Image: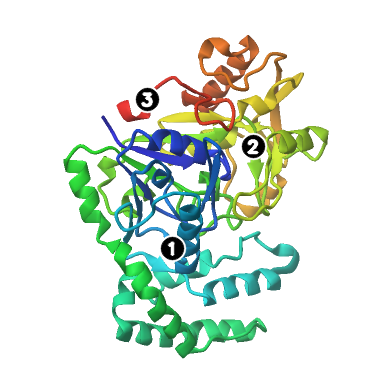
Amino acid sequence: MTNVAVIGAQWGDEGKGKVVDWLASRADIVVRFQGGHNAGHTLVVGNQTYKLSLLPSGVVRGKLGIIGNGVVVDPDALLAEIARVRAQGMDVGPETLRIAENATLILPLHPALDKAREAARGESKIGTTGRGIGPAYEDKVARRAIRVCDLAEPETMSDKLDELLLHHNTLLRGLGAETFEKQALLDKLLALAPQILPFAEPVWERLDEARRAGKRILFEGAQGLMLDVDHGTYPYVTSSNTVAATAASGAGIAPSAIGFVLGIAKAYTTRVGSGPFPTELHDATGELLGTRGFEFGTVTGRKRRCGWFDAAMVRQAVKVGGITGLALTKIDVLDGLEELKIGVGYNIDGKMYTHLPAGQRAQAKATPVYETMEGWSGITRGARSWGDLPAQAIKYIRRVEELVEAPVTLLSTSPERDDTILMRDPFEG
């Protein structure tokens, strides 16, 4: 048996929620290791739909959930999410949820700065969710962040707030935004402390014990590899590293313990927010994909941009992210289309590229080079075995495997949890 890390192989929103939920039923522990409440997973369990942003998906299955030190935690958002799922009948408490004591907190001044910056950018805005993720990570690397463990030390929080407000209020003033008062923030944190601290612990210790005991650990990534702050379409990226390697540093466990890396990719491509998108469709087909796939952001509700499958981009994600196998989702959205296209590279100023260059201007100029395939008239929706798939759908999947240089090990054929075809069990390695 091996552990499994799940990461997005596109720009996020690939359908990780269903896949993680499906895998979580067989795991002992599920760990969130990066990001914040700027990404969401939608899980459909029976007649209940759960929308999770910070809680690890395993809590829906009664498994131990861990929020690792690589996550930036908005305590208000977390408590609201816990209250929401409790109202749906889910038991979430310190027995089922643990938070790394060294995780960074998002304070009200972080989203305020996030929104003020986006407003100042005007037409050049990045497309952030405005939830303060980036500013919180900035404070973390600048060594002025307030962390979960600081909630137990009022004097530490008071000292840190002096430095935080000196920095943030200066920026907010310059952007014409409202500033913050120290006492109000300190009072808020002191009130939050007894609600958050019961969940806190050195989770690295628990994970080490679980690994030694042979427990199955599922590492749950957020966003997608092309939103990675180093390897994505910078600056139109998230503020954390989304590659599988981050599961080690973001949870506090040895890299050798990560195990099988499952990359999630849609059978087409979507993106929320600004930034390059070479295979984007601005026609009726793009609208059809969005309508059929119900392409709206879980967290923001923003309409997703839709386009053809970009194999060159996913191949890049496979190589950089260390992806062992792919879970291909939403294949059913392509049912009935007479013709399908797959992006196999990019034309930039007359030169052919098989990867997306790092340069911002080069990315903006990239136009797709397509390979065209015949669609299928049969139905993949609801298929639960390889034999249920139309022959042309199988050809499409096989071609995807060839182009991205990774096997499709799991296929999702509808939002329903059991409409899944497993070719290789990630937990078996």
* Image disc number at residue 425: 3
In which quarter of the view is residue 258 placed?
top left
* Quadrant in the picture for residue 355: top right
Residue 24 vertical position relative to residue 375 in the rendered view, above or below: below
Residue in the foreground of this view, choosing between 29 and 344:
29
**Residue type, label 2:** Thr
Please state the total of marks drawn on the protein image.
3
Q: Is residue 279 visible?
A: no
**Residue 31 appears in the figure:** yes
Which quarter shows the C terminus?
top left
Dot 1 falls on a residue whose secondary structure is strand
Give the vertical position of 399 relative to 172 (above or below): above
Q: Can you tell which mark lies on residue 140?
A: none
Dots 2, 1 in contact, CB < 8 A:
no
- Disc 2 crowd rating (10 Å Cα; few below 14, some 14-19, many 20+) is many
Query: How would you rate the neighbour count of disc 3 (Cα within 10 Å): few for under 14, some for 14-19, many for 20 or more?
Result: few
Please identify the quarter of the rendering in which residue 117 is found. Answer: bottom right
Of circles 2 and 3, the one toward us is: 3
Residue 23, percent from left and from top:
40, 34
Residue drawn where x is 61% and y is 65% of the image: 130
The residue to which callout 2 is attached is 269
Looking at this view, is 357 or 184 the one in front? Answer: 184
For marks 2 and 3, give the CA distance: 25 Å
Write down the residue under mark 1.
Answer: 72
Query: 112 and 363: which one is in front?
Result: 112
Choose the circle earlier in sequence order: 2 or 3: 2
**Front tag of 2 and 1:** 1
Q: Position of residue 407 (x, y in %)?
A: 46, 23
Query: Gap in Å between the C-alphas at discs 2 and 1?
Result: 27 Å
Measure the alpha-carbon separation of dots 3 and 1.
31 Å
